[in-house]
Image: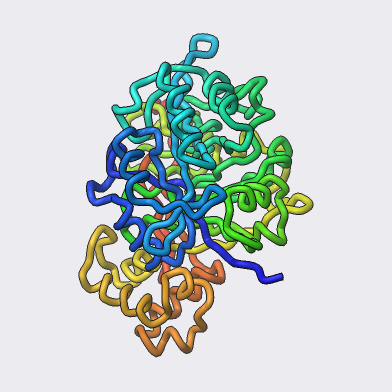
Amino acid sequence: MILIQIIADFQLHSKYSRATSKNLSVEVLSSGAKRKGLQILGTGDFTHPIWLKELKAKLKEEGEGIFSYDNTHFMLTGEVSTIFQVEGLTKKIHHMIHAPSFEVVEQINEKIQKFGDLKSDGRPILMATAAEVVEEIMSVDKNIFVYPAHAWTPWFGVFGSKSGFDSLKECYGNQLKNIHAVETGLSSDPGMNWRLSALDDFAFLSSSDAHSANPWRLGREANVFDLEKISFKEIHDAILKKNSKRFLFTIETNPNYGKYHYDGHRNCNVSLSPKDSKKYNGFCPVCKRRLTIGVLNRIERLADREEGFVPKNAIPFKTLLPLYEIISFVLGVNVLYSKKVLEIHDKLIDRFENELNALMNVNEEDLKKVVEPKIADAIIKVRDGNVKYEPGYDGVYGKPIFNGNPEKRFISQKSLSEF
């Protein structure tokens, strides 16, 4: 039996979602996937009528729920936002949807358009409970795959501190039977989620949630499979069964790198671990307003296992950083855009076929033949998990520290009388 290894990024967006690059198109995504080393992309935003029209026009049907453009495979995916009240509290939760065909997508859109304007955003707001939306979607086709997106993000995560829940049951009610996976998001990884025994029956997925096709966004988190053939059913069967022979591992960024790992207040440059945050009762020690409570704090509150616990049959994960960002941090260059960084980045990709191959597989000596030793050393350090981080907080990305120690952003403790 010949198996095909594929790397899949299921969650991303089109140019029709808010706060996304206007260059996002099928062509740009396909090109970006090749440079990254991704074999399957989610289409994202299939609920948006104009994007759906473009997908139908440009994607070639390969059969069994898989489509293609210029040798890049696509699977039909979308994300929706539900806003609803529970006991007087507003809940805002994002959900991912995978569909096996355009026909099913059209039926999903017909079902959920009564809850909101699908033309308003690539990730539409639906004024309905999570359970109502899942019930409507699953009534179309039992093969549809639905799960909470970036589950721990303070805003819009099912476990988020701002408008989330303490359990999946509280969110999905009698539709929990149709939820089989959880997307971990940038600020958590499977290891953190393993600490909750209530999540043992769920698979953990990781995707980029890319808002652009830049190399430091697309595929920064992904899912790796060994399959007999590339099909919608094969992929989801591997996920549902948590089959470690077919669902090999997920690719994660270090959770410290995510924008909401620590508690904090961006305007005051305050970043706090859960322990330090507790000293201030969840209030910013500078402006005295409430802190944005991060993912690590929520994990600590809900966990019933010690750090380091690994459940039986857990799907493993590998921790990486985008190549562009490794280079930019080593050189001390602005992450957003640098011609110099891109030149080095492209040189590595051109030499080693794609970014993920360079990050995961190429040995240090071969890397040094293409780039200076300090960059090669940083790539290996990331691969081996030998990097310190300045944790992200309140919408601010974390930073890898390749030399020296992380900056101490939190404020030293004051007495409660100073509040």
Labels in figure, total: 0
The image shows residue 401 at horizontal and vertical percentages of 42, 65
8 vs 327, nearest the viewer:
8
Q: Is residue 294 above or below residue 137?
A: below
In the picture, the quarter occupied by the C terminus is: top left
Residue 117 in sight here: yes
In the rendered image, the residue lying farthest to the right is: 312
The image shows residue 63 at horizontal and vertical percentages of 53, 52
- Could you tell me which residue is drawn at 49 percent across and 66 percent down? 387
The image shows residue 224 at horizontal and vertical percentages of 58, 60
Q: Is residue 305 left or right of residue 225?
A: right
Residue 152 in sight here: no
Q: Is residue 98 left or right of residue 354?
A: right
- Could you tell me which residue is drawn at 43 percent across and 64 percent down? 405
336 vs 225, nearest the viewer:
225
In the picture, the quarter occupied by the N terminus is: bottom right
Q: Is residue 354 left or right of residue 99?
A: left
Name the image colouring. Answer: rainbow
In the rendered image, the residue lying farthest to the left is: 339
- Could you tell me which residue is drawn at 58 percent across and 62 percent down? 318
Q: Is residue 82 above or below residue 71?
A: above
362 vs 385, nearest the viewer:
362
102 vs 119, nearest the viewer:
102
In the rendered image, the residue lying farthest to the top is: 88
Q: Is residue 279 above or below residue 204?
A: above
The image shows residue 368 at horizontal and vertical percentages of 41, 87
- Could you tell me which residue is drawn at 71 percent across and 35 percent down? 198
